[in-house]
């Protein structure tokens, strides 16, 4: 099957066939916590512990975060779809309260897990920047039984319940 590589709509639709988890990347911007929804995240290396986030060149994140800076990565649970929308550009009153890590980096304490990372390198990649970051701190928040929030085909999704998967 061939595709017209100039057809960005088709490219986006095909790439949407890859299910991803949803994260909110959090950082300090002009002395205040800021965040953006990102599903372009991955673990890169165990030694050293490195992760990668991809961000649009035109984003506030790219304008604010440089090599050596710290930021947070918050894994969202299925109960946090509204937070994903809030940080994805559909701001809603009363959402997005963040806590501060000892490093001064903001994070979402009710997320499934959060990482505090320091930018080790930034690589240009078309209309995005790839941020490779060293993990400084991490925590899995086991105080709730939520499954991860997923994104697939341009929509939010959820894992099947354990009972449905084993039926």
Image (cartoon, rainbow, N blue to C red):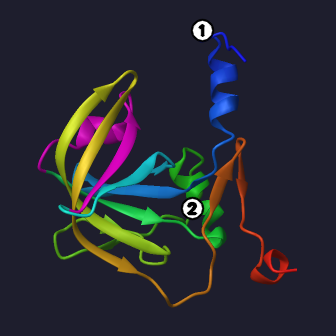
Looking at the rendered structure, the secondary structure element under dot 2 is helix
Task: Tell me whether the residue at label 2 lies in contact with that at label 1, contact meaning CB atoms closer than 8 angstroms.
Answer: no
Which x, y percent locates residue 54?
39, 40
Q: Where does the C terminus fall, quadrant-wise?
A: bottom right
Which x, y percent locates residue 104?
19, 68
Q: Which residue is mark 1?
A: 6
CA neighbours of label 1 inside 10 A, class few (<14), some (14 to 19), many (20+): few
User: Above or below — where is 108 with respect to 92?
Assistant: below
Looking at the image, residue 132 sits to the left or right of residue 126; the answer is left
Q: Where does the N terminus fall, quadrant-wise?
A: top right
Residue 95 location, quadrant: bottom right
Which residue sits at x=44%, y=69%? 97
- Of 124 and 91, nearer the camera is 124
Which x, y percent locates residue 121?
17, 42
Which residue sits at x=37%, y=61%? 73
Which residue sits at x=69%, y=14%? 2
Earlier in the chain: of badge 2 and badge 1, it is: 1
Q: Which residue is mark 2?
A: 83
Q: Which residues are magenta?
A: 49-68
60 magenta-colored: yes
Q: How far apart, in angstroms, are the residues tagged by discs 2 and 1?
A: 33 Å
- Which of label 2 and label 1 is nearer to you? 1
């Amino acid at each position: 099957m061939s595709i017209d590589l100039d057809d960005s709509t088709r490219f986006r639709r095909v790439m949407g066939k890859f299910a991803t988890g949803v994260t909110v990347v959090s950082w300090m911007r002009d002395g205040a916590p800021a965040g953006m929804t990102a599903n372009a995240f991955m673990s890169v290396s165990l030694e050293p512990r490195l992760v990668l986030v991809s961000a649009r060149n035109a984003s506030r994140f790219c304008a604010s975060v440089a090599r050596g800076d710290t930021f947070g990565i918050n894994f969202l649970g299925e109960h946090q779809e509204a937070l994903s929308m809030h940080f994805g550009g559909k701001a809603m009153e009363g959402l997005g309260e963040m806590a501060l890590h000892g490093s001064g980096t903001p994070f979402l304490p009710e997320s499934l897990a959060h990482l505090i990372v320091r930018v080790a390198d930034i690589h240009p990649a078309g209309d995005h920047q790839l941020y490779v970051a060293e993990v400084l701190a991490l925590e899995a928040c086991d105080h709730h039984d939520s499954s991860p929030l997923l994104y697939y085909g341009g929509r939010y999704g959820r894992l099947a319940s354990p009972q449905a998967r084993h039926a």
